[in-house]
Image (spheres, rainbow, N blue to C red):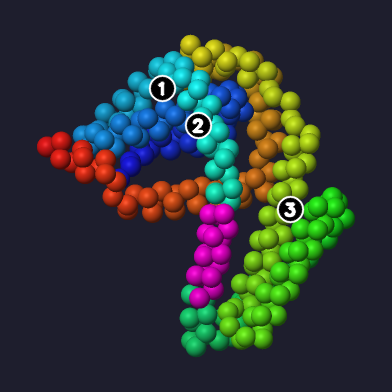
């Protein structure tokens, strides 16, 4: 089972700030350093048993030059991250559907005890979701391109068919249909926002040029930012805040939830390397 100490979580939380100050290359290399730390701590159980050793190992790795990893490895790792986007999006959709259905089942299980409360809650969720879907759909119809409008029409047809099937078959919960309609419309809204951002890219901050020295360590790069002028730091923070819209924050929360769920499932699967090291270590 992989172990992530608290100091690693601190680096993960600071990733957006590091990206705005240092640029993507340093962040990718820091991600590889964290993965290397986790791998070493996993194959050497004594590191997990003594927290000081885990922290000391991470400090040593962060103090090493960022060119510890070859440029080819960094490029391959970056391409793997980019190519995993469709898979993560599919896992997000599955996680949302599973969460909605499980929550609805738990809610309906109390219908015999509190019928009025349960029915009112289901009806309220349904109305709010359809109103939100219609509002987002109207905005997309008025501001979207032809491809966005065609996708919006497909979502409307699928939502209508799903609602009719639920009502005719008298199976399922009507709030599930409404929430799925809102989720699909919201995903289309996110796609439009991403297309708009890619069409009008933001200018990278000047601090990115400062962090391009691959002979420095992550610790040295971060220490160097303490001596920057306030104007340079402000431009980097404005760059970060321009990306952290409410939509982006929700997507980050969903992506983190899916990754943690996948990691939880993967940790339950016994790996051959685990058996090998348990036979070698006392």
In the rendering, at what x and y percent does residue 241 appear? 67, 36
Tag 1's secondary structure?
helix
Left of 75 or right of it: where is 237? Answer: right
Element carrying mark 2: helix
Say which residue label 1 marks: 62
Q: Quadrant of the C terminus?
A: top left
Q: Which residue is mark 3?
A: 189
Residues marked 2 and 1 touching at CB (< 8 Å): no
Q: CA distance from mark 3 to mark 1?
A: 39 Å
Look at discs 2 and 1 and give the one toward the viewer: 2
Q: Earlier in the sequence, mark 3 or mark 1?
A: 1
How crowded is the residue under tag 1: few (<14 C-alpha within 10 Å), some, or many (20+)?
A: some
In percent of width and height, residue 126 lies at 67, 74
Numbered range of the magenta stretch: 90-105
The answer to whether residue 168 is visible is yes
Which numbered dot is residue 77? 2
Q: Earlier in the sequence, mark 2 or mark 1?
A: 1
Q: How many marks?
A: 3
């Amino acid at each position: 089972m992989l172990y992530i100490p608290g100091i690693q979580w601190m680096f993960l939380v600071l990733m957006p700030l590091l990206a705005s100050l240092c640029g993507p290359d340093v962040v990718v290399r820091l991600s590889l350093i964290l993965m290397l730390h986790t791998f070493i701590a996993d194959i050497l159980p004594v590191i997990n048993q003594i927290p000081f050793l885990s922290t000391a190992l991470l400090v040593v790795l962060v103090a090493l030059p960022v060119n510890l990893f070859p440029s080819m490895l960094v490029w391959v790792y970056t391409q793997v991250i980019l190519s995993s986007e469709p898979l993560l999006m599919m896992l997000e959709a599955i996680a949302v559907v599973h969460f909605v259905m499980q929550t609805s089942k738990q809610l309906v299980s109390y219908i015999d005890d509190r019928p009025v409360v349960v029915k009112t809650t289901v009806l309220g969720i349904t109305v709010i979701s359809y109103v939100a879907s219609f509002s987002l759909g109207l905005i997309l119809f008025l501001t979207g391109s032809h491809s966005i409008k065609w996708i919006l029409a497909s979502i409307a047809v699928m939502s209508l068919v799903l609602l009719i099937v639920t009502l005719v078959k008298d199976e399922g919960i009507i709030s599930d249909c409404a929430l799925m309609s809102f989720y699909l419309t919201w995903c289309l809204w996110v796609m439009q926002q991403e297309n708009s951002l890619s069409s009008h890219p933001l200018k990278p901050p000047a601090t990115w040029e400062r962090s391009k020295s691959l002979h420095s360590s992550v610790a040295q790069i971060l220490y160097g930012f303490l001596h920057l002028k306030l104007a340079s730091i402000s431009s980097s923070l404005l760059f970060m805040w321009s990306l952290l819209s409410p939509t982006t924050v929700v997507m980050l929360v969903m992506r983190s939830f899916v990754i943690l769920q996948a990691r939880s499932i993967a940790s339950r699967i016994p790996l051959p390397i685990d058996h090998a090291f348990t036979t070698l270590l006392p």
